[in-house]
Image: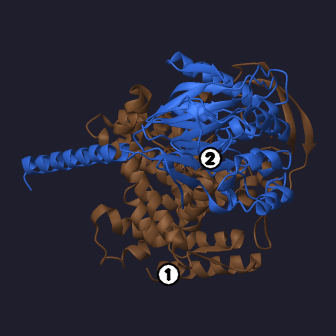
Amino acid sequence: MAPLHTEVAYGDTIRVEGKLQIPENFETGKDRTFDYPGYLAKDGILYQMSFAAIERLSENDGNFLKAWTIWSKQKYLAGLARALSEPQAGLAGGITVGDKRGLGEELSQTFRTVGLTHIVVLSGYNIVVVVEALMRFLSRFPQTFRLSLGVFVAIFFAAITGFASASSRAVAMATIAILGRATRRTYLASRALGLVATLMVLWNPYVLVFDPGFQLSVLATTGLILFSPLFASRLSWLPSKFGLRDIASATLGTQLAVIPLLLYQNGQLSLFALPANLLALAVIPWAMFLSLIASIFGLISGIVAPIFGLPAYALLSYVIYVAKAFVALPFSALSIPVFSVWWLMFIYALLLVPILWKHIKG
Amino acid sequence: MQKSVKILGVTVLILFIITSAVWYAVIREDRGGKLTVSFLNVGQGDSIFIDAPSGRQVLIDGGSGRSVLRELSNVVPWYDRTIDVVIATHPDQDHIGGLPEVLSRYKVSLIVESSVKDENGADSAALEKAVAREMLTGAQRLVAKRGQIIDLGDGAYLEILFPDRAVTAVETNTGSIVARLVYGDTSFMLTGDSPQSIEKYLVTLDGSTSFDIAQDKPLTTSGNGLKSNILKAGHHGSKTSSAELFVGFVGPEYAVFSRGCDNRYGHPHKEIVSLFERFEIPTLDTCTEGTITFVSDGQNIRYSK
């Protein structure tokens, strides 16, 4: 941990002097701790250093592709910063490239409490939105070109997050789906998920136990595949406008799958996750597109950029308003006392019963 | 719906939004002869935003990090990407840490600094870099010196009380810029992290003068050049600042502690809290109140929540 404004960039070779420490668990709520050493160990980090003094020895030693990815992400964020004010710019960075530093601790906590965090970290959802929009936009182009561009963009997005678990999983699954379409084979999401998750655990066994990003991402996708269809058939009374029905069944399915683990990890139950997601997710694809426009104008049009950023500003403000409105309601989050990991297993086993039942009957 | 009708509808909607935005800006830009001063809630640190009756804007210090950006969004409208003057009182992290980000996002015309330097500071180096970049787009740079008046238009101005000499070799807090913001009969005393020694020195310089530099006439209402309605308690309420003599000469209606909750320095110090209690000066605290805003019409100052 060095001072905020220490000038270090990717590709630098540095010499660091400071006090080495072994990372420690930290509390995530009443009687709950987060296994921080394990979380760091998954990336091969075993020590942390405080009071670090950094000396730069040389520059540009890194991988050219990585450097380019980081450069373009930073340019994009700089454009956002010029076109939008905070916290809108921070939210735009979160929903498009998973950069949530600008959001601030208070607003991040608000998004967590109402069950909207998944939109501000680059989860698979954002990548799917981008790839789908791209496919629609390029619908007249030859298929090989479209599909390979789709794979390229998906991998680019995963690279932006430093190949974090959730985005790697999404990209791998999207790639399998695209390959399936190209070779005219049937794509079964459940099998793709099984394959990708297995490979990821084989590649880095730590993610299975120590990476909440991996766990939540796999569970959410499982929920989307197994539970959402069950909800969808019972939601025909909801209007299908703005994709509300799909959002509702996707939210219910994923929430059902991740809630037990979230409760086990931090004990917070978001009571308004469904209405908050219905109201917010309906505008997210547009907010992402308009943020991109805002960033481009931010880079080229100087101090009048906010005018071109106005549409994005309006939608992003709306999303922030939704999150804040729900967090202000009484009982926006319930606290659940600590329970044993065996209960967690039991709950997941119970959740599988209706699925198995349906399977046997069908 | 026919396609032409749809296009017509969208066009009308866009024009409506643009018109509303323009009218919003017109109304927002009229200050109605009022000066607004906000002590921004940036945690442990200082950041003060001044919105002058003429529409000119001044930011004094920028807290320790990015939080100043979120706070600025609450006091600067969404379309406004300019701040006329940025003042860095002294190069400590809790005062200048957020300024490089401010300079990269807002177009600033004048940057005022103290001549005191923090040679090895990472924040100081980052600010230096950001200032150099800002000067490429036409920003002016000024080293603060006693006697300078920054005219904010329509009768509002900032007068620099300290440093009265080059302070390159002193400790950073001692080199803090001390400025007094004046509008009509109302004024604010803004002292950065100045220690008691400087406060007492200012009493010897300004305590007895009864001269208003800008108006070029004696002050009849206050009787001394330090008298102010609002005092930002120096150094976040540390006991190294707020000398009894100085606080007495300033004689404020309110004192403000700009500090973060649970800061590791124990600011504000209990001796300082009890000093203000003894003087029966009510205090406001950014930790408990959040951003603290005062509005002056030139005669009276109102504290608005």
Q: Which colour scheme is used?
A: by chain
Up the image or down, A110 lies above or below A130; here it is below
Label 2 amino acid?
Ser
Residue A234 placement: quadrant: bottom left
Nearer to the camera, B45 or A191: B45
**Left or right, residue B200 beside residue B49:** right
Up the image or down, B24 lies above or below B156; here it is below
The quadrant of the picture occupied by the N terminus of chain B is bottom left
Q: Are marks 2 and 1 on the same chain?
A: no
Tell me the distance, in whole angstroms, between the alpha carbons under discs 2 and 1: 56 Å
The quadrant of the picture occupied by the C terminus of chain B is bottom right
Element on which disc 2 rests: helix
Horizontal and vertical percent position of residue A338: 75, 78
What colour do you see for chain A? brown
Label 1 amino acid?
Ile
Task: Work out whether residue A183 can be spotted.
Answer: no
* Front disc: 2 or 1: 2
Element on which disc 1 rests: helix
Horizontal and vertical percent position of residue B160: 65, 30
Task: Work out whether residue A281 can be spotted.
Answer: yes
Q: Which mark, residue A360?
A: 1
Horizontal and vertical percent position of residue A64: 62, 22
Q: How crowded is mark 2: few (under 14 residues within 10 Å), some or many (20 or more)?
A: many
Residue A50 placement: quadrant: top right
Q: Which mark, residue A305?
A: none
Which chain gets the blue colouring?
A: B
Residue marked by disc 2: B67
Nearer to the camera, A272 or A154: A272
Nearer to the camera, B247 or A317: B247
Q: Residue at x 19, y 45 (%)?
A: B15
